[in-house]
Image: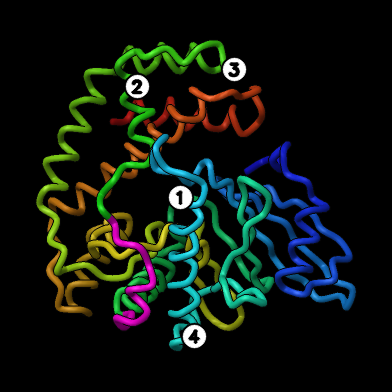
Amino acid sequence: MLKPPEDLDTAALAAALTREWGIAVASMTYRAVGFGSHHWSVVDSAGTSWFATVDDLRRKRYSERDTDDWAYERLRCALDAARGLHDAGAAFVVAPLTTAGDLPVARLGAHYAVTLYPLVTGDSFGFGEYDGDGHRRAVLDMVVGVHGAPPEVRDRAAVDDQTVWHRDALEAAIDGVPAGDCGPYAQRAADLFAEHADRVREVLARYDDLAAGVEPDRAVLTHGEPHSGNTMRTPHGWRLIDWETALVSQPERDLWILGGPMQQAYAEATGVTLRPDLLAMYELRWDIVDLALEADRFRRPHTGSPDDEQSWSVLRRVMSSI
């Protein structure tokens, strides 16, 4: 995210780092990286550097029926699985540090949750193409490691029920349910959804048909977003970061993004035959979730911030491609 949330007190964040992890905070610097979470570089009084991530639990809900407590528990489960996988020997996992209460994440005020990581240095990558075949192969090897998590680690994560985040907001948008004058993009978003409503309904119906074919017995621990932006090349090897979306799911959830050659390599490495219909399903869900997240954003009060501007760009791009 490009800017820290306006309703988050950074003094409260520093206090949480001290209370939960024993960090005597000397300085904090906001890092405008990624999209979805807020990040700070933290230096303690001894000069040690850390990396803190804050998630808005309101954005982690799947629907209006969900609560912040529900979203926090899903996040806790995902991060606990990452912690367990790292502790089981998967050095490529950049796992959260546990609190004094042995939790991978702590509540921060009414609507936020904070996670602390060691600061990892190395080459970072943006969302987009991998940096050559070696990069793609390295990601495949890490994904194979994730999918091979032992049951006691896998079962720490929540199970993917194929729900589309904020589908209720997306369906309200395409059904023309008024959102009111809640911000500068509200009417533009409403007009865009009205223009493409029939196509979005077709995409949702296609997704539902594909999701009906999921086989629970094939489920493994999945990262959820092993794109280039969630990888780092360090002096000690490749690393996989951002585990907030880890779920027990079909292997195709991680494989669709890697492309055909790596999908074949995965089958050879694991003996698992990937299903083309599920590869298509998860690729489709990626776009649907983008639409739904932005539908939810622009149906709520917003100010036209740089993050809103970026979200509007994402919405138009995805809408033009489905």
Question: Of marks 4 and 3, which one's residue comes earlier in the chain?
Answer: 4
Number of other residues with Cα within 10 Å of mark 2, as a class: few under 14, some 14 to 19, many 20 or more: some
Image point (16%, 47%), residue name? 211
Badge 2 element: helix
Instruction: Point out the stretch of residues depicted in magenta.
Output: 149-160
Which quarter of the picture shows residue 2? Answer: top right
* Quarter residue 252 falls in: bottom left
Q: Earlier in the sequence, mark 2 or mark 3?
A: 2
Residue tagged 1 = 128
Identify residue type, mark 1: Gly
Graded by Cα atoms within 10 Å as few (under 14), some (14 to 19) or many (20 or more), the crowding at tag 3 reads some
Q: Which residue is mark 4?
A: 87
Could you tell whether 264 is left or right of 142 in the image? left
Name the residue located 78 percent from the left edge and 53 percent from the top edge.
12
- Please state which of the two labelled residues, at mark 1 or mark 2, is closer to the viewer: 2
Cα separation, mark 1 vs mark 3, equals 30 Å
Residue at left offset 58%, top offset 46%? 56
**Residues marked 2 and 4 touching at CB (< 8 Å):** no
Q: Are marks 2 and 3 in contact (CB under 8 Å)?
A: no
Relative to 4, does residue 121 appear above or below in the rendering? below
Of pointers 4 and 1, the one earlier in the residue sequence: 4
Give the residue type that dot 4 points to.
Asp
Q: Secondary structure at mark 4?
A: helix
Kindly identify the amino acid type of the residue bearing the numbered disc 3: Gly
Q: Position of residue 212 (x, y in %)?
A: 11, 48
Viewer-side label of 2, 4: 2
Q: Dot 3 corresponds to which residue? A: 183
* Local secondary structure at mark 3: loop
